[in-house]
Amino acid sequence: MIRVNVAITNVSAERFLDIKKPFPQVNINTNLNLVGVEKVEDSLEVPFVLTISYNPSVAQMSLKGKAYVAGEKVELDKIYKEYEEKKPPPPIILQSISNVVFLESVVISRTLNVPPPIPLPQIGQAQPPAKKPSEMDYSA
């Protein structure tokens, strides 16, 4: 069983727009890069960088860190071998990293008073049920 611990080692965030100005409609681009996979004794280290940019340029964020992957030697060797073959990392590693960094980026966005970098759930309006035809229409 693989265990993943994620540690953020560097946080950089800045708001460029004056707090008194109205906030324009923005597009938010997120980019999570896994820099590599390194063998360290009986575990793996996966350095990563998350960059978040707003367009128009009203703010930016960058979070750097490492994921520490522990587990059975066979599993770790398989992950490292797949990394060397340029295959994508196991979903549990990517999911663990993204959960931590996106949660942290939401907290930072609140501190900067900018929109969060993840889409908020949209609640749709209730649709009226479709009307059934009053009489059956068969054609031969």
Image: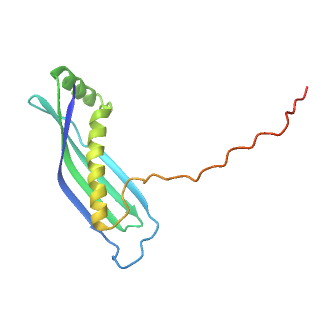
Q: Give whichever of 37, 20 is nearer the camera.
A: 20
Which residue occupies 10% across, 28% down? 42
| Residue 44 image offset from top left, x and y in percent | 16, 33
View extreme (right): residue? 140
View extreme (left): residue? 41
Rendered-image quadrant of the C terminus:
top right
View extreme (front): residue? 134
Q: Give whichever of 133, 31 is nearer the camera.
A: 133
Residue 43: quarter of image: top left
Compared across the picture, whether 19 is left or right of 138 comes to left
Rendered-image quadrant of the N terminus:
top left
View extreme (top): residue? 74
- Whether 15 is drawn above or below 3: the answer is below
- Whether 17 is drawn above or below 63: the answer is below
Compared across the picture, whether 51 is left or right of 66 comes to right
Query: So how many labels did they put on this image?
Result: 0
Which residue occupies 83% across, 40% down? 134
Which residue occupies 42% across, 75% down? 22
Residue 138: quarter of image: top right
Q: Give whichever of 122, 133 is nearer the camera.
A: 133
| Residue 109 image offset from top left, x and y in percent | 31, 61
| Residue 65 image offset from top left, x and y in percent | 19, 48
Residue 72: quarter of image: top left
| Residue 68 image offset from top left, x and y in percent | 17, 37
